[in-house]
Amino acid sequence: MNKTILIVDDSESIREFLVFALSNHGFNVLSGINGKDGLKYFTNYTKEIDLVITDLHMPEMDGIQLIEEIRKLEKFKHLPILFLTTESGLEQKMKAKKAGATGWIIKPISPEKIIGILNKCLR
């Protein structure tokens, strides 16, 4: 598979869970602890990033701001970006969609379900 996924979440346990689950399914995984940390991969990283999974609520730069910053970069205008949320309300989903998110994943999630979602997004 060799697709590279960037995980951006301020929760260490969520990052570890996703890194473990995705690595075990053949993905290369990068991670950031907040939006600002995740954004560095788009300015200082020389390899291709195939998909981003980001939390919405993070310190320094939240997920909405991260999505907006990524979408400003011409090379990444069509990069699939999924946001993780515990919120089921439509308002946050629409805010993220307006910023440029491809879709969302409601926490908690199983490894099987996330792999299925990623496989659909990366076709």
Image (tube, rainbow, N blue to C red):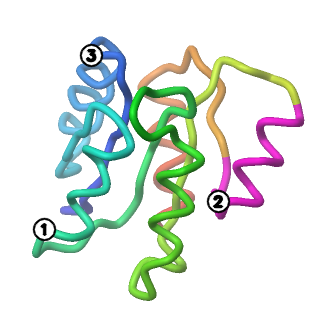
Q: Which residues are magenta?
A: 90-103
Residue 105 in picture, x, y percent from top left: 62, 34
Question: Which amino acid type is marked by label 1?
Answer: Asn
**Marks 3/1: CA distance?**
23 Å
Residue 106 in picture, x, y percent from top left: 65, 26
Residue 115 in picture, x, y percent from top left: 44, 40
Secondary structure beneath dot 1 equals: helix
* Residue plotted at (39% across, 86% down): 75
* Residue plotted at (29% across, 25% down): 15
Count of numbered circles in the view: 3
Q: Which residue matches tag 1? A: 44
Crowding at label 3, few (<14), some or many (≥20) Cα neighbours within 10 Å?
A: few
Crowding at label 2, few (<14), some or many (≥20) Cα neighbours within 10 Å?
A: some
* Residue plotted at (46% across, 27% down): 58
Between marks 3 and 1 in the image, the one whose residue lies nearer the viewer: 1
Q: Is residue 69 above or below residue 57?
A: below
Q: Which is more N-terminal, label 3 or label 2?
A: 3
**Marks 1/2: CA distance?**
24 Å
Question: Which amino acid type is marked by label 3?
Answer: Glu
Q: Which residue matches tag 2? A: 102
Q: Which is more N-terminal, label 2 or label 1?
A: 1
Q: Is residue 81 above or below residue 25?
A: below
Q: Which is more N-terminal, label 1 or label 3?
A: 3
Q: Which residue matches tag 3? A: 12
Residue at the farthest front position: 60
Question: Which amino acid type is marked by label 2?
Answer: Thr
Residue 39 falls inside the magenta stretch: no
Q: Is residue 46 above or below residue 104?
A: below
